[in-house]
Image (spheres, rainbow, N blue to C red):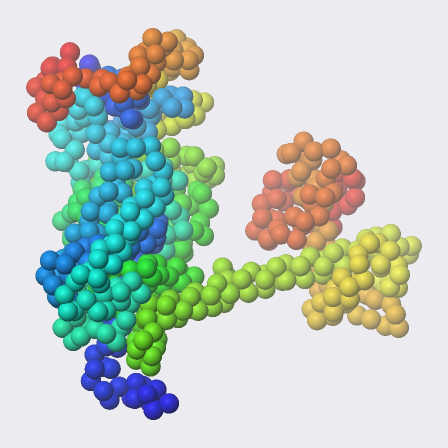
Amino acid sequence: MEKVIDFLSFQDPTVRLVVAGTVLLSISAAVVGCFAYLRKRALVGDALAHSLLPGVAMAFLFSGQKDPWLLLLGAMVSGWLALGAMELIQQHTKLASETAIALVLSVFFGFGVLMLTYLQHHGGGDQAGLDQFLFGNAASMRSSDLYAYGLVGMVLLVIIGAFYKELKLYCFDPDHAQAIGLPTRGLRYLLNTMTVLATAIGIQSVGVVLMAALLITPAATARFWSYRLRTMLFLAALGGAVAGLGGSFASYLAPAMPTGPWIVMVLSFLALVSIFLAPRVGIFARMWRQRQNQRKIIRENLLKAFYHGLENREGDQAWLSRPEWQEQRHLPEWEWQIGFRQLRRHRWILRRSGHYRLTERGLAEARRVVRLHRLWELYLSRYLALGKDHLHPGAESIEHLITPEVEKELLRELDYPEQDPHRSPIPYKS
Amino acid sequence: MSANKEATPALEVHNLTATYDRQPVLWDIDFSLPEGSLAGILGPNGSGKTTLLRNIMGLMQPDSGYVRLLGQDLAKVRAQVSYVPQRESVDWNFPVSVSEVVAMGRYGPGKLLRRLRRPDRDIIEEAMEKTGILPLAHRHISQLSGGQQQRVFIARALAQQAQIYLMDEPFVGVDAATEEAILNLLGEMKDRGQTVIMVHHDLQTAQDYFDQAVLLQTRLVAAGPVETVLNKENLQQAYGGRLNVLSKVGQLAAEKQFPLREKAFRERKKPAHGEGD
């Protein structure tokens, strides 16, 4: 508990430094990752992260120390080699791009693990902690590391800010970018280099195995909530920051535990919440819409049944008994129950001792549904050359869907007809 | 082969040959179109219409031959040339709004590190108004119908304020109202002396829409005023199937990975006029 308070109060300068560094590099990875995500290069990001390992190990092997700048240099070299290899494989063989990605990922990563193992057995005094590159350990970063990674992260964000509109255009429509004479090759190199760097600065705190999560998950999560690139970048940055904070917190509480998995846990939680809660595309939103549709269908079916009851009755009393109403249409009892409740809530029916009648607005609504049904049947028979016995099922669902604008167009197209194909009158406003 | 030597044609294509993985898609295409024309590039599926457009726009390097726009290299007159790609060529789920896409028409190499200015904004708004999408300016592009999406692309092209417009099937998947609206716009552009060159697949309407036509079938069947191009004999040639020998040679080239031109012939950088004949 003491440690929790320690961490949260940010009194300890090392804590402050680790948190600031981790959050900053998480933000820049998340923002850079948005562009990889939008170019549909999520898998490339994963392969890239794994491919940095041999470069990092190589840098350590040659220098004998854990200097952040040398590590970045090594990571850059092997990242670029990996990208080049993927491109060459795709250009010169008939292999699918996912095959090329899988090949490069496994070969580079395997080689990196090999070198890491060698270093741990034969390396110098500082070899301890090299395995942190696999799963990350935020707390193990020294201030020189943090300054280096923080600086690179900052530079990446500045570059994205500076070339924001060109990057947006290039990701959306590269042909247009090239056609108006933008340096598309340069933009592609820029994006690739930024992806390599954003991945490289994260490997000490997150590790190569899980770095792709920090690159792609915030982007995918943010996309659920945003329809503008600007908002998406901002939300992804926010998600990255929260994950970075969570990761460094966990790392501080339990230094023996790798940070990467914790960051991924936080990110996955955010993603999961988004999948359920996002507006419009979220699972709950979809379920809600389904439910609304179902209610509408039930309620309109009941209205239609009532209208048929009115058409079939003798005389012209406005009241129908419940059996008279229900015999117009076979629906399961629960639908009737929901339907009654719906109609009452909309104030479309009145009840008096077991008999029902429609209110004025209810009658207008019932007329509308019947009108749409019959108009659509007429439309189908006229324009889709459907036989009379095939008309009803199609109209049965479409009648609930047609909006007032479409109705107007339909009326114009059919020239305000009097009767449907079955010679039933089409009810207009009385 | 241009008839009037006095005026520079809007577009000249000289001996253009293009291949995909050595399979030739365009054989020795050679024609020119006068300025101020509304031209249709016609031909059956797979006849190389889109490929021709991509070569003209420098999105693909031809194996031989070269292109002149307003008598110049594309690089020199890029600002005067606007390209409207096929609607399906981009991801309409991309997180941008209608006005953002139209604004892309004002981007350019001279505007790196710079925000769009007030005059740019005015031009963007006017382009949206002309294409009837101003009320949709803040919509996300995935919420648009096919016709509206096409209008967005046309608005982006208008915002470029070019002299030549190259469009790839702007009428595909578009409602009748949009087709008419676009057509009216194109008529106005033509009256202002701008040139519109369009890939089109509907022969029925071609006669009415265009004054110039280019009929392709991997080779050039005919080019010129629409009434002389679209005669029975030419259409028979274009749509009656491929030339046997030509397509066999093409297949051979692809199979053996054989270059269609020897190296020396590839000189496109500074072509002397009349070299290709």
Q: Quadrant of the C terminus of chain B?
A: top left
Front-most of residues B124 and B173: B173
Front-most of residues A390 and A211: A211
Residue at the extreme front of the image, as rendered: A121
Identify which residue is drawn at 39% across, 70% down: A266
Front-most of residues A54 and A423: A54
Q: Position of residue A369 (x, y in %)?
A: 70, 53
Q: Position of residue A126 (x, y in %)?
A: 16, 69
Q: Position of residue B161 (x, y in %)?
A: 23, 42
Q: Relative to B172, is B216 above or below?
A: above
Res. B194 visible in picture: no
Residue at the extreme bottom of the image, as rendered: A2
Q: Based on the displayed image, in which of its 4 quarters is residue B201 positioned?
A: top left
Identify which residue is drawn at 79% across, 70% down: A350
Q: Relative to B242, is A119 above or below?
A: below
Q: Based on the displayed image, in which of its 4 quarters is residue A141 positioned?
A: bottom left
Front-most of residues A334 and A351: A334
- Relative to residue A266, is residue B259 drawn left or right? left
Q: Based on the displayed image, in which of its 4 quarters is residue B38 positioned?
A: top left
Q: Relative to B129, is A88 above or below?
A: above
Q: Position of residue A55 (x, y in %)?
A: 19, 55
Identify which residue is drawn at 23% across, 77% down: A18
Identify which residue is drawn at 83% across, 66% down: A356
Res. A277 visible in picture: yes
